[in-house]
């Protein structure tokens, strides 16, 4: 992995992951509060790929039962646009295109990917936007001043598809099977900060401990 002059926080998520959506405000706040202490980078986990890809109707029953629990635990709200997708049942659940879009975004703004992940999940899980097309990405990149044609060219390129699948493979190699997961990379070593949802106070506490351990190594 690339070397950085500050410890690197790796936020392993999937655009279609409801718990990641609930965790999004937490990691976004942490990236803002601790921006002078760590670099924060989003890593796509590839939750729904291969034979898991299919119409949302395959998961709708489970999601309709589970999303209320995510809302209660995290304070996030799933929007009417997304709930309509669940009711219609035809939307194709596929993690690949939003993951490629994240890889492309990082080629423009490598250290703003937490913000983009937040925007992307809100577009889908609140507004019900289609992440398999291109229009949603054109809408999302506007505020970042990214050229649409250049973004589209990279989105459709073999290079960024391969890069994204390599990222999926790296997540598997690290033994990560659930999302969200937060890791810290210090030099060449990677350690787990959290698995699953935790609130901001708990995440901040753990990041402060990491800071202390770096400043005062045993």
Image (cartoon, rainbow, N blue to C red):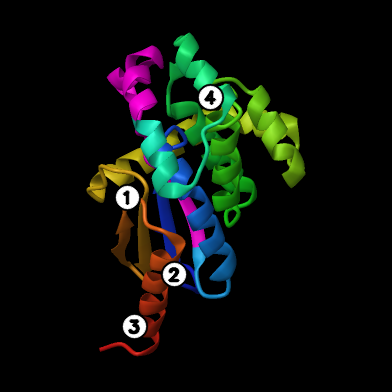
Q: Secondary structure at mark 3?
A: helix
Disc on the earlier residue, 3 or 1: 1
Residue at 41% over, 77% down = 208
Q: Position of residue 17 (x, y in %)?
A: 41, 36
Which image quadrant is residue 134 in? top right
The residue positioned 34% from the left and 31% from the top of the image is 66
Indicate whether 202 appears above or below 145.
below
Judge the density around disc 4: few (<14), some (14-19), many (≥20) Cα neighbours within 10 Å: some
Tag 1's secondary structure? loop
Residue depth check, mark 3 versus mark 2: number of the one nearer the observer: 2
Numbered disc 2: secondary structure: helix
Residue ID for mark 4: 82
Q: Position of residue 79 (x, y in %)?
A: 56, 30
Residue that label 2 marks: 204
Residue furthest left in the image: 175
The Cα atoms of the two marked residues, 1 and 4, are separated by: 22 Å
Q: Nearer the viewer, mark 3 or mark 4?
A: 4
Disc 3 to disc 4, C-alpha distance: 42 Å
| Quadrant in which the C terminus appears | bottom left
Taking the magenta stretch, the answer to whether it contains residue 3 is no
* First to last magenta residue range: 40-65
Image position of 37 (left or right of 45): right
Q: Which residue is mark 1?
A: 196
Label 3: few (<14), some or many (≥20) within 10 Å?
few
> Mark 3 highlights which residue?
213
Label 1 crowd bin: few (<14), some (14–19), many (20+), radius 10 Å: few
Circle 1/circle 4 CB separation < 8 Å: no
Q: CA distance from mark 3 to mark 2?
A: 14 Å
Sequence order check, earlier mark of 1 and 4 = 4
Residue 55 vertical position relative to residue 188 in the rendered view, above or below: above
């Amino acid at each position: 992995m690339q070397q950085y002059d500050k410890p690197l926080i790796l936020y392993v998520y999937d655009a279609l992951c409801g718990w990641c959506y609930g965790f999004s405000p937490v990691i976004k706040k942490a990236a803002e509060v601790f921006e002078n202490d760590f670099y924060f980078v989003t890593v796509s986990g590839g939750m729904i790929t291969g034979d898991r890809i299919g119409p949302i109707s395959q998961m709708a029953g489970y999601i309709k039962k589970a999303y209320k629990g995510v809302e209660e635990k995290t304070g996030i709200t799933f929007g009417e646009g997304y709930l309509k997708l669940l009711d219609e049942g035809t939307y194709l659940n596929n993690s690949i295109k939003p993951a490629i879009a994240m890889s492309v975004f990082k080629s423009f703004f490598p250290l703003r990917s937490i913000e983009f992940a937040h925007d992307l999940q809100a577009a889908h899980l609140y507004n019900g936007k289609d992440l398999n097309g291109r229009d949603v990405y054109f809408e999302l990149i506007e505020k970042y001043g990214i050229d649409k044609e250049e973004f589209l060219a990279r989105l459709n390129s073999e290079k960024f598809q391969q890069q994204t699948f390599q990222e999926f493979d790296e997540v598997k190699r690290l033994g990560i099977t659930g999302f969200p997961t937060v890791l810290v990379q210090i030099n060449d070593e990677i350690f787990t900060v959290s698995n699953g949802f935790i609130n901001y106070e708990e995440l901040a506490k753990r990041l402060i401990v990491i800071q202390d351990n770096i400043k005062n190594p045993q």
